[in-house]
Amino acid sequence: MSGNPVERLGRGTTDLVVDLGGLARFAGRVVVAGSGRPWRLRRLLDEVFGIGVLSISIIGLSGLVVGLVLGLQGYNTLVRFGAENSLGAVVGLTLIRELGPVLTALLVAGRAGSAIAAEIGSMVVTEQLDGLRMMSVDPEDFVVAPKAMAMVISMPLLSALFITLGLFGGMVVAVGIVGGDAGIYLTSLESSVEFREDVLGSLVKALVFGVLVALIATWRGYTAEPNAAGVSAATTSTVVASSVSVLIFDFFITALWRV
Amino acid sequence: MNVSPLRDLLVGCFVLAGLLSLAYLSVTLGGLSYRGPGGLQIHATFDEVGGLKPRAPVVIGGVKVGQIKSIQLDGDLRPRAVLDVDPAVGIPVDSSASILTSGVLGDQYIGIELGAEEDVLKGGDEIQYTQSAVILERLIGKVVQNLGADSE
């Protein structure tokens, strides 16, 4: 980095715009490549296994523990106002509107996003993508599209599992630890959750986060420097960039559409 | 990658479990169950709806038969609620609707007292007899006023 500060600011801005433009063109190519024939269902299924099925344990355990904590914290706060019957509403709305999609996206970015970037990055290093191109197989169609698609499919499903297990965790606290009633918990839950505002909003968030993590992870791997340090940098920046952009997008989705 | 039936089975289970969770969140919690074209829509106009909100239950004798679809002011600036009820339940035309509260601080709902007529309400009909929500502050205000009048 040389030159005066203004020059460096200009170069940084140009680099950012070039990077974002490259990402957008890459996204367009992947969508075009992935939506045409052949469908590559076998590849997609394998990727859903790697991204979705193998994430179930971490997502399920985290969801359960988050639900337990929310139940305890919510109870401790609500009991001061004599409103402990609203525990179900507090746990449910917090999980469905905010924590479910966001925590799922952060966990999946750390567990599966980093793996995607490392795998594609090491394929760049060992020139496997060039090998595919030599056999006139488009790597964006064969390698990137199934991974990105599997991420977009898995994210809402994992988020729904996270939320459901979290609601169960909250009920365990409400019934088992603070000695409440399961019926009161479920009634408060069911009467406060709206389909359009809460559940649909949660689904939209999870889909947006899935697209974000999928794009960032595959793009970082695809553009990794072809050496060992490049793969490690791609993996790190995948986790950092997708976590930060998930949180920023979460704020804007919440602010703009009140979901 | 080698093809294994067990892996496919696990992927299938994952997708099923995710979809089941989504269905639970949408239908049971989100209250999608009473939405749809099959619902019979009837209207009821009140003087005061208090804390009544859309999706509040409509009950007959404690059993939920539908929910509130929307509440809007009509031409005379009176709140008018659209009730979405199960068409299989025949509600007599001379039935009355009251806004009730479950418990002291609970949510408000509409309770329907059945009438005696043979004819039942059809889609778009209006419930003639309605009873508005009880506003606790006004009730207390009246009691205080009456106490003041007595002591003079």
Image (cartoon, grey):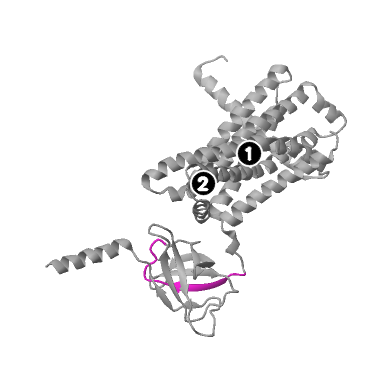
Q: Chain of mark 1?
A: A
Q: Nearer the viewer, residue A208 or A202?
A: A202
**Disc 2: which residue:** A175
Name the residue nearer the viewer: A170 or A162. A170
Per the rendered image, the range of residues in magenta is B38-51
Q: CA distance from mark 2 to mark 1?
A: 20 Å
Q: Choose mark 2 or mark 1, whichever is in front.
A: 2
Where is residue A25? Give x, y as percent. 69, 36
At a point 78% along the width and 41% down the height, the residue shown is A45
Please, is residue B19 above or below residue A144 in the view?
below
**Can residue A240 be seen from the camera position used here?**
yes
Instruction: Tell me which amino acid carries mark 2.
Output: Val
Residue bearing mark 1: A60
Q: Position of residue B145 (x, y in %)?
A: 20, 66
Residue shown at 71% from the left, 48% from the top: B16
**Residue drawn at (68%, 49%) of the image:** B19
Q: Position of residue A7 (x, y in %)?
A: 53, 20
Position of A145 with respect to A71 (left or right) is: right
Q: Give the amino acid type for the residue marked by disc 1 in the picture.
A: Gly
Disc 1, SS: helix
